[in-house]
Image: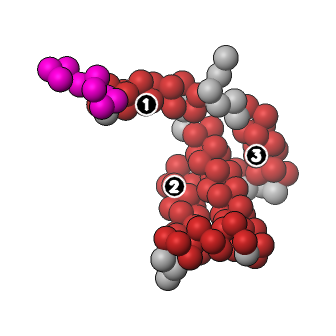
Amino acid sequence: MPLLDVRELQFVLQRFAADRNWEPLHTIKNLSMALAGEAGELVAIAQWMTDDEAGKAISADTDVRRQMSDELADGLIYLVRLADVCAVDLDRAVADKMQRNALKYPEPGNTPGH
Ligand SMILES: [Mg+2]
């Protein structure tokens, strides 16, 4: 069972780009830069808030919550589109990376020699 199945979203994004003749613009460089830009938009939402203020704003302020949702969606869209253009299988990549992360960061008490 896949951890992450984005095939339908990839298909929707392929069609969205094709219908607008955006495929020539969807280069690896452009999509990488767009993804970085969306990360910046995400950071800007809580840039001047304390951690407590940001937590409260996300749970209580519908405008902040909508902004956060929009920027997370924008980032995911560019990430999935970039993976598609690069022919990276995101499900395989995430599974492989989590396996390497588990080896690199063992649970406390499971560290060899302890
Ligand atoms: Mg955005």
Asked if labels 2 and 3 touch by Cβ distance under 8 angstroms, the answer is no
Q: Earlier in the sequence, mark 1 or mark 2?
A: 2
Residue at image coords 53%, 63%: 39
Q: Earlier in the sequence, mark 3 or mark 2?
A: 3
Residue at image coords 72%, 72%: 60
Residue at image coords 59%, 48%: 79
Q: Identify the secondary structure beneath mark 2.
A: helix
Quadrant of the rendering where the N terminus is positioned: top right
Q: Which mark is residue 97?
A: 1
Q: Amino acid at mark 1?
A: Lys
Q: What is the distance, in whole Å, between disc 3 and disc 1 at their CAs? A: 25 Å
Q: Residue furthest left?
A: 113
Asked if labels 2 and 1 touch by Cβ distance under 8 angstroms, the answer is no
Q: Nearer the viewer, mark 3 or mark 1?
A: 1
Residue 87 location in percent, x, y? 57, 32
State which quadrant residue 105 falls in.
top left
For label 3, the residue is 13
Quadrant of the rendering where the C terminus is positioned: top left
Q: Which residues are magenta?
A: 106-114
Front one among 38 and 86: 38
Residue 71 location in percent, x, y? 66, 64
